[in-house]
Amino acid sequence: MTEPDSKRSRRDPAPWGDGSNGHRASEQDPYAGVPPAGGYDPYGRRPYDDYYRDPYGPYAGYPAYDPYARHHYPPPGYSSGYYAPPPPGYGYPPSYGAPPGYPPPGYPPPGYPPPGYPPPAYPPPGYPHTAPADRERDPREPSHRSRSPRRGKGSRKGKDQGRGKRKREESPDDSGAAISGADINLTLAEVFPRLAKAAKEQEGSRFLQWKLAGNCSAEDKAKIYDLAMPDTVKLATDAFGNFVVQKLLEHGTTEQLEVMLSKVKGHVLELSEHKFGCRVIQKMLEVLPSPKKSAITAELMDKVVQCVYDMHGNHVVQKIVENLSADDIEFVIRAISAKAAEMAAHMYGCRIIQRLLENCDAAKLAAVLDPIVASAGKLSKDSHANYVIQCVLERGREQDKRQIVQAITRSVLDFSKNKVSSNVVEKCFEITAIGVHADVLADERSALMRAMLGSSSDPAAPIAKLMKDRFGNYTVQRIIEYSRGEDWEELCRRLEAVAQDLKKSPTGQYIITALEKKKAAMASLTIMYMLLGVLVDVAS
């Protein structure tokens, strides 16, 4: 008589698990000697074979179980067990034993599986592919997706990354997929009686957009305009309807655009601060003729600051700055100049100032730039205002750049070790080396370099402290990139003197790499000049 289950060790292999193919069944691996249907309980209980063992052992005529076989028959322990089918209610789906005499004698046929199966080179070497080595992450770049405006090396140069230009959340309809009428089972005859309602539905909105984009006759397009026009404001504030209104604006005639403009009059501020309505106002500022745009700006004339501080309204103000002339946006400049320093540090206000610098002559922005430049030291350390300072260094007046560089020079070590202001320091070296006013800022550049290098005999010089600083090392790399003449020679001597120590430091290795890259570039440039000289001599 067989030993009771309670006295048998759970580690004992199943009686059929020692076959000639070398695969042993176990309760821990149901895919080895036991097929999943019989050896695995989806409800997490003990395996079926652990409760119901066949005391008579495996079927004598059944060959060893082969997990590579195409037909995974139940193991022989179930062929003549106590239960056929298994106990009611146990497991799902139920697994049934094979009928008597099955499998037939001689199965599987001799020579199966064929010799060399599975092939020895499977899976092929190197599969699955190993992931490429991660790049060295900028410590200033957060390890997770963050709202911080500092996004590592890619967010430098004052390009208004992060919150300033972060992509807004897409609407439920704005999936980016191409709109095709063939995929939508609708007809204009079905949509016309309920057009306003259909435009607020996903399929109806896509269908109407597709039709307006040139897939219907002029008569049908005119009828769509006539039916949608009374509900322009309601559709503009709908998640799907606003896209229909935008299409109407894109493909409408001059007369139709004037009618739509008349419909939104009195609702411009309301729509500008709405999640979906602001997109319709922006589209109007893009497609309307210049004289007609004044009807929109007139309603926002005294609400500029309110819109700037609004998460949706600020996009409308940006669009006004981008699409109207400098004279037409004078009301925006006046509103911003009243509290320029405060707006520069605001997550939405900083966007407006950057758009002004990009689209207006800096001379017309004196009222905006003067208070910002006066607070350059404080604003450089702000997570939003630092982008404004960088933009001023790129596009501002000569005196603005000089004043900012001088403010940075006075505390260059402190600014270089700060997460956000280190970007401003890098921008100072850039614009004094290759910027528009680089020639007239030569004295400021020399003073900035002297403040950074310090004395060669001073071990506490700013350059020495920044080499191993998590943020300052990026400033050192930028100094290497923009160094010229005597400054470059002095910097090389300083770095080569501590090269061995830098190679042992994670941040120092980046500096050594930047130094070698600069030397290689200069050597290539020297060779090119020599070759040009030879060619000139030969030609002469």
Image (tube, rainbow, N blue to C red):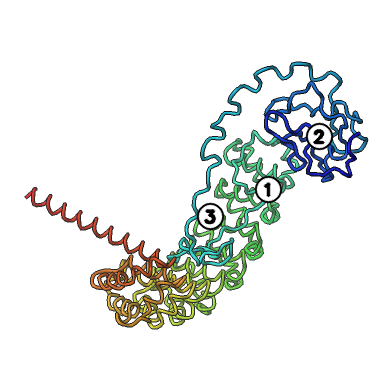
Q: Among all residues in the image, which is located at the extreme left?
A: 540
Query: In the image, which disc is placed on residue 38?
Result: 2
| Residue at the (49%, 70%) spot, across then down | 353
Residue 188 falls in image quadrant: top right
Alpha-carbon span between mark 1 and mark 3: 19 Å
Residue type pointed to by label 3: Leu
Horizontal side of 287 relative to 430 (left or right) equals: right
Residue 54 location (% of width, % of height): 87, 32
| Residue at the (91%, 31%) spot, across then down | 83
Q: Are marks 1 and 3 in contact (CB under 8 Å)?
A: no
Please name the residue that numbered disc 1 is placed on: 228
Horizontal side of 30 relative to 49 (left or right) equals: left
State the residue in front, 294 or 466: 466
Q: Secondary structure at mark 2?
A: helix
Alpha-carbon span between mark 1 and mark 2: 63 Å
- Of circles 2 and 3, the one toward us is 2
Q: Secondary structure at mark 3?
A: loop
Horizontal side of 73 relative to 215 (left or right) equals: right
